[in-house]
Amino acid sequence: MPAAGLGLRLGGGLPKALRELGDVPMLVHALRSLLAAPGVGAAVVAAPPDGVADVRGLLARELGADAPVTVVAGGATRQESVSLALAALDGDCPVVLVHDAARPFVPVGVVEAVVAAVESGAPAVVPALPVVDTVKEVAAEDGAERVVRTVDRASLRAVQTPQGFRRDVLAAAHAAAAPGGDTTDDAGMVERMGVAVTVVPGSEEAFKVTRPFDLLLAEALLAKRRAERASDAEVPVV
Ligand SMILES: Nc1ccn([C@@H]2O[C@H](COP(=O)(O)OP(=O)(O)OP(=O)(O)O)[C@@H](O)[C@H]2O)c(=O)n1
Ligand SMILES: C[C@](O)(CO)[C@H](O)COP(=O)(O)O
């Protein structure tokens, strides 16, 4: 779980994964969501390099001292953070998921679909949603932006995480990548090796907190989920 990003587009001064949602940092929600999936046995978190001890303390408090979570120092780019976390993985785990700490509410069903696709033989799997906006390619012209063309959105997908891989495939992609590279997702690195990437349905609830509006959305979704849990827990009157 890459969690070392600064969150410059969100702003606010704190590394994004440590921004609170409800009463705990986003990272805690993301780990709970991921570890709730039956196929997920353990996690390695790439934390902000100067916050490793704090993140270890936080996760011990929130998830318990025996939670199957290792914390390592992340790097200057997402790609580097994932590489560092991969290097800390235990021996016996043939399937690896890479999940953004900035996607706190991925539903268990999405995680299970990704794992199932890898276990069925796909070397690399991404969850994705169709692009719903009308998309235009633009170029700068005389100090203004002009439309070059309207892109056919029928074949466009917005990809999410967790992205799932055969471990050897992901390790090879990271080994082949330029050190210090800044590929925005792991599937992109695997694509460059000519490996097929399978797409499974994503979920709107797996959205990434990128900009301030996303934080509002995350707070609203958290409140909705908590209200639903509270009403499920009410004892029915007979
Ligand atoms: N050096 C980095 C940069 C990003 N990430 C992680 O990669 C995920 C997705 O990245 P993004 O949303 O781009 O996060 P930031 O890089 O933090 O955001 P920004 O680009 O706005 O600064 C996040 O969980 C983030 O913590 C990371 O582990 N290490
Ligand atoms: C992997 C990823 O979540 C794909 O959407 C990635 O973190 C995206 O980073 P971006 O720079 O915000 O597109």
Image (cartoon, grey):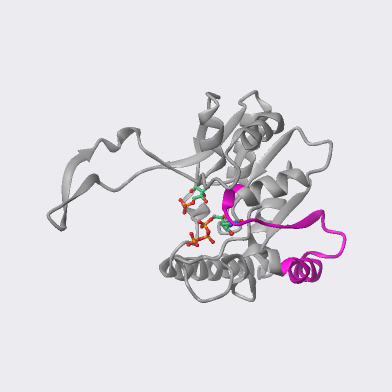
Residue closest to the far front: 179
Please state which of residues 153 and 1 is positioned toward the viewer in this rendering: 1
Residue at 74%, 50% in the rendered image: 43
Quarter residue 135 falls in? top left
Q: Residue at x 47, y 68 (%)?
A: 10
The question of residue 72 being in magenta is answered with yes
For this rendering, which residue is in front, 155 or 137? 137
Relative side of 225 to 212, left or right: right
Q: Which residues are magenta?
A: 51-79
Residue 184 screen position, x and y as percent? 50, 47
- Asked whether, in this view, residue 88 is left or right of residue 34, the answer is right
User: Looking at the picture, how far across and down is residue 80, in whole percent?
Assistant: 62, 49
User: Residue 37: in sight, yes or no?
Assistant: no
Q: Residue at x 25, y 35 (%)?
A: 152
Task: Verify whether residue 151 appears in magenta.
Answer: no
Q: Measured from the top left, where is residue 174 in percent x and y?
A: 63, 37
Front-most of residues 92 and 181: 181
Quarter of the figure that contains the C terminus: bottom right
User: In the image, is residue 74 above or below residue 202?
Assistant: below
Q: Is residue 134 visible?
A: yes
